[in-house]
Image: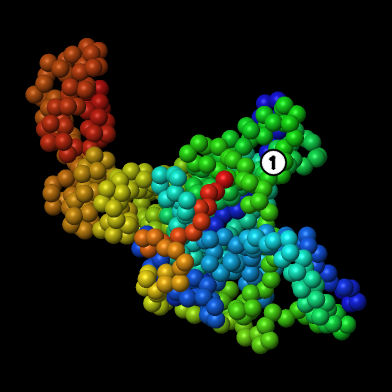
């Protein structure tokens, strides 16, 4: 059977490194790329007799995520020990939240193929990261090395329900999650630094079948690309096995980024029995209403909700709305520009699209080339609003406006000031254009006669002559209008 | 649970040893099964009390909301951190080969 004849059921677990400066239970830095084992202390390397103390910011970030994803927040929560022995976990347990996660239920609302869908969450919880285990380059080495800088780094684990049924939905979910965590400054989501990592579970069953498929878990997915490649491989592998009547087993597989395949883990490594119990070294957390009130009051609009609002309120295409809400600073800039333009009396029709075009084009190009934030570009929203207004009024042409942008950045001056100082203002005044037109027609009697004989192509030549006379500063639309009118009279 | 006898058989000892990455001899498995059973049977005395109305307790004195600010405090020097490591190499802990997959 082709792959389309199967129901695909996918769930994702995501680990996001929280944006804190220090670790979950000690004051060691969490900087990426530091000298190995230079950011550790007795607490995070599991010396006996130490006293861990919870990082307040990590808890508040967890609560921020719980509110953003509309989870149920417990009145009281605590940490639990997840016990297992592995060289990257020096305490032989990971501090996590098994019994009272910071958020239960909730959802992430995505848009896939133009359809909005809520991907349900099972829970989100706080935990600490393990260290980094490496096998030396050039195989044959009979040892591995451990760097414990990462051990104890605060993580947020976000566990979905098996609510995704296509790769498009998985991709939209990961993108929405990343954008949300970034916009809310919960995580920087730098995948190349391991700040956002995934585990997937997937099962297939024939369309409409009520028997559940065998669930396969895949670990070691370090980028959205890896998730998509791996799931694509798994779908084909499982469909082929089902087609051939081979039984699938419930198992854990490991993704190999080099081969693009998933491989079965040895059953010994699968045999986990974490024997969770409450972490006795850490007291309970009683969630106070005042914390939640403060977090709510500081919470920005979620990027996806803002995108959909931009589409509706400003009638922008989905693409524009997506680009403009990519970063909070850009979305804020857009809305401030619109407000300033309206205050200046700009024409409302098409205003949003005009501002969007200028922002997505020349302005963001400058932002990217100069590697600055939009706020550091030296063009305040009011100046861009003025620029769009000048084009609307025909005071300057679009080409002149393009030339103005770099000068606006260099001088910090508003566009009208620059344009008049440098003589870039366009001649739109009908009286001035009529004067130019009559001068040109007088000097080109031969072409005027040809036009009247029906050689309409001559119009282009005459237009060029008027523009030349105006040194390029005449408004082409006005010139064309007056020229045509005069010739036909 | 009241009145139920806790018993640890050799199979359980093997299972727990596996989780703890411990290798035990057959004699040790027998010995530990008996010793662990004795310990659990002793603790089992507590099951004579009716605790159905008592919340499980993780700590004797529960003080809620103890936090620290997200402010760095000094870490150990690499040499100090690795001082107790049985084996090390170039600033790393050295452990038996772990090959994933
Ligand atoms: Zn530490």
Label 1 belongs to which residue?
Answer: A203
SS class, disc 1: strand
What x and y, as percent, mark residue A97?
63, 67
How many marks overall?
1
What x and y, as percent, mark residue A449?
16, 15
- Write the residue at 47% across / 54% down: A143
Q: Quadrant of residue A21?
A: bottom left
What x and y, as percent, mark residue A140?
45, 45
* Label 1 Cα neighbours within 10 Å, binned few <14 / some 14-19 / many ≥20: many
In the rendered view, tell whether residue B47 sits above or below residue A82: below
- Write the residue at 67% across / 59% down: B18
- Write the residue at 24% across / 39% down: A399
Residue A314 visible from this viewpoint: no
Residue A447 visible from this viewpoint: yes
Quarter of the image with the N terminus of chain A is top right
- Write the residue at 16% across / 36% down: A472
| Front-lying residue, A84 or A472 | A84
| Front-lying residue, A348 or B82 | B82
């Amino acid at each position: 059977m082709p792959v389309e004849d199967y129901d695909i059921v996918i769930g994702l677990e995501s680990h996001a490194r929280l944006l804190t400066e220090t670790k979950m239970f000690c004051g060691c830095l969490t900087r990426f790329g530091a000298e190995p084992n230079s950011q550790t202390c007795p607490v995070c390397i599991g010396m006996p007799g130490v006293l861990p103390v919870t990082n307040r910011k990590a808890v508040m970030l967890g609560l921020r995520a719980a509110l953003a994803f509309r989870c149920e927040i417990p009145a009281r929560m605590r940490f639990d020990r997840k016990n297992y022995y592995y060289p990257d976990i020096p305490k032989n347990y990971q501090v996590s939240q098994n019994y009272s996660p910071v958020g239960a239920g909730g959802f992430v609302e995505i848009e896939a193929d133009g359809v909005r869908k809520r991907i349900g969450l099972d829970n989100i919880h706080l935990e600490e990261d393990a260290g980094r285990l490496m096998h030396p380059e050039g195989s044959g080495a009979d040892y591995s090395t451990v760097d414990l800088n990462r051990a104890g780094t605060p993580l947020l684990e976000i566990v979905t329900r098996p609510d995704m049924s296509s790769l498009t939905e998985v991709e939209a979910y990961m993108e929405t999650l990343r954008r949300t965590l970034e916009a809310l400054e919960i995580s920087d989501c730098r995948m190349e630094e391991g700040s956002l990592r995934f585990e997937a579970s997937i099962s297939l069953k024939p369309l409409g079948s009520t028997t559940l498929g065998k669930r396969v878990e895949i670990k070691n997915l370090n980028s959205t690309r890896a998730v998509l490649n791996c799931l694509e491989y798994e779908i084909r592998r499982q469909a082929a096995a089902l087609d051939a009547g081979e039984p699938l087993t419930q198992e854990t597989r490991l993704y190999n980024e080099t081969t693009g395949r998933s491989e079965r883990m040895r059953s010994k490594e699968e045999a986990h029995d974490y024997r969770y119990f409450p972490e006795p070294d850490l007291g309970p957390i009683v969630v106070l209403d005042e914390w939640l009130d403060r977090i709510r009051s500081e919470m920005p609009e979620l990027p996806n909700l803002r995108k959909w609002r931009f589409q509706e309120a400003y009638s922008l295409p989905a693409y524009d709305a997506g680009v403009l809400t990519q970063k909070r600073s850009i979305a804020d800039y857009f809305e401030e520009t619109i407000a300033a333009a309206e205050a200046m009396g700009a024409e409302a029709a098409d205003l949003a699209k005009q501002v969007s075009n200028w922002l997505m084009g020349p302005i963001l190009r400058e932002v990217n080339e100069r590697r600055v934030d939009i706020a550091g570009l030296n063009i305040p929203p009011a100046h861009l609003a003025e620029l769009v207004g000048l084009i609307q009024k025909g005071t300057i042409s679009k080409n002149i406006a393009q030339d103005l942008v770099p000068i606006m950045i260099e001088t910090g001056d508003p566009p009208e000031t620059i344009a008049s100082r440098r003589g870039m203002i366009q001649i739109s005044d009908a009286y001035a254009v009529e004067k130019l037109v009559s001068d040109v027609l007088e000097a080109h009697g031969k072409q005027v006669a040809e036009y009247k004989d029906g050689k309409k192509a001559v119009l282009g030549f005459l237009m060029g002559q008027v523009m030349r006379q105006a040194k390029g500063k005449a408004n082409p639309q006005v010139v064309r209008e007056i020229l045509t009118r005069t010739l036909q009279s | 649970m009241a009145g139920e006898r806790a018993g640890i058989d050799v199979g359980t000892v093997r299972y727990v040893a596996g989780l703890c990455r411990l290798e035990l001899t057959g004699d040790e498995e027998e010995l530990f099964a008996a010793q662990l059973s004795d310990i659990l049977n002793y603790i089992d005395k507590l099951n004579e009390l009716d605790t159905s109305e008592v919340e499980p307790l993780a700590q004797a004195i529960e003080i809620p909301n103890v936090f620290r600010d997200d402010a760095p405090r000094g870490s150990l020097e690499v040499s100090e951190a690795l001082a107790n490591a049985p084996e090390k190499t170039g600033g790393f802990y050295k452990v038996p080969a772990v090959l994933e997959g």
